Amino acid sequence: METVNPNVLARLKFDDQGLIPAIVQDASSGELLTLAYMTRETLELSLKHRETYFWSRSRQKLWHKGETSGNVQKIERIEVDCDGDALLIRVHPQGPACHTGNSSCFFTELVAGGEPGSAELQHPERFSTVVERLFHVIRQRKASMPEGSYTAYLFSKGLDKILKKVGEESAETIIAAKNHSRRELILESSDLIYHLLVLLVNEGLELDEVIAELDRRAQRPTAASDAG
C-alpha cells in the first residue's frame, strides 16, 4: 500500500460519534464485501498493520477482522470520497467477509428481476455453493475453536453430542413435514443440513466425497436403481 498522505488523513470527517463509514471491496474481483465503521484509532491500526480494524457499534468495542476466524483482510489501498466522510478500502480477503460464511455481506436481493416495487427477499446462489461455503466455515471453526461459537461448542462436546443433535433435528424435520408447515420445514431442514455438515467435519470427511456419491446416484440410468 502506498505511503499515507497526511493532508488527506487530516481532512477526514468523522461523525459526532467519532465514526466514519468504510466500504470494503475485494481488490481482485471488485466485489463489495461489507460496510463497516472506523474510528480514528481503528483507521490508524489498519494503516499500521495493513489489515482491517473496525469499531463495533453494537458491542461498543474495537475489533480486528479475522482475529478469531482467521478471515483477515489484507489492505491494498484506501481511498477517500470527495467529501472526506467515507472510505473505500480495497483488500485481499483471506476468507469470507460475512459472519454468515458468505464471501460478501451483500447476498440478499431486495428487488429481483427488475420488477418495480418488488420487496421479496431472494437468495439466488446455488444450493451447492452455499453448502460448500458453510462447510468451509465449519471447518475453520473446528481449527480455531473461537470462544462463544456454537459450532466450536459442538466440537468440544464430541461425537455423541453431535449425533444427538443430528437425531433431534431429523425428528423435528419430520414433525414440520407432518404439520405441513412450510416455514418450519425450511428452518428445521436447514438445521439438519448444518448439523450433518458438522458431523462430516468432525469425522474428517470431505464434502467432495458426498457430492461425488450424490452425482453418481443422479447419473443412474433407471429409476428402479434408486432404491439401492
Image (cartoon, grey):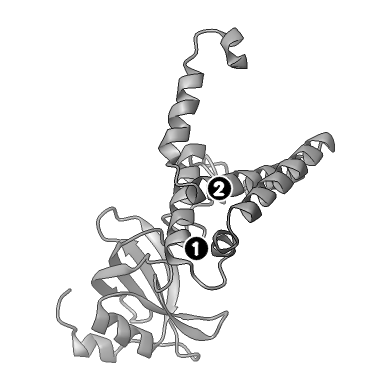
What residue do we see at 34% from left, 75% from top? 52
Q: Amino acid at mark 1?
A: His
Residue 199 bears which disc, if any? 2
- Towards the viewer: 202 or 35: 202
Quadrant in the picture for residue 81: bottom left
What residue do we see at 30% from left, 87% from top? 44
Quadrant in the picture for residue 49: bottom left
x and y percent of residue 60 in the render? 54, 86
What residue do we see at 34% from left, 80% from top? 83
What residue do we see at 58% from left, 57% from top? 158
Residue on which disc 1 sits: 99
On the rendered image, what quadrant is the N terminus found in?
bottom left
Residue 210 bears which disc, if any? none
- Towards the viewer: 181 or 164: 164
Mark 1, mark 2: which one is toward the viewer?
A: 2
Residue 144 in sight in this render: yes
x and y percent of residue 10 in the render? 27, 92
On the rendered image, what quadrant is the C terminus found in?
top right
x and y percent of residue 5 in the render? 18, 85
170 relative position to 159: left or right: right
Secondary structure beneath dot 1 equals loop
188 relative position to 9: left or right: right
Structural crowding at the residue carrying mark 1, measured as other residues with C-alpha within 10 Å and reported as few (<14), some (14–19) or many (≥20): few
- Disc on the earlier residue, 1 or 2: 1
Secondary structure beneath dot 2 equals helix
Quadrant in the picture for residue 70: bottom left
Q: Establish if 28 lies above or below 42.
A: above
- Towards the viewer: 23 or 179: 179
- Towards the viewer: 192 or 133: 192
Q: Amino acid at mark 2?
A: Leu
Structural crowding at the residue carrying mark 2, measured as other residues with C-alpha within 10 Å and reported as few (<14), some (14–19) or many (≥20): many
Residue 111 in sight in this render: no
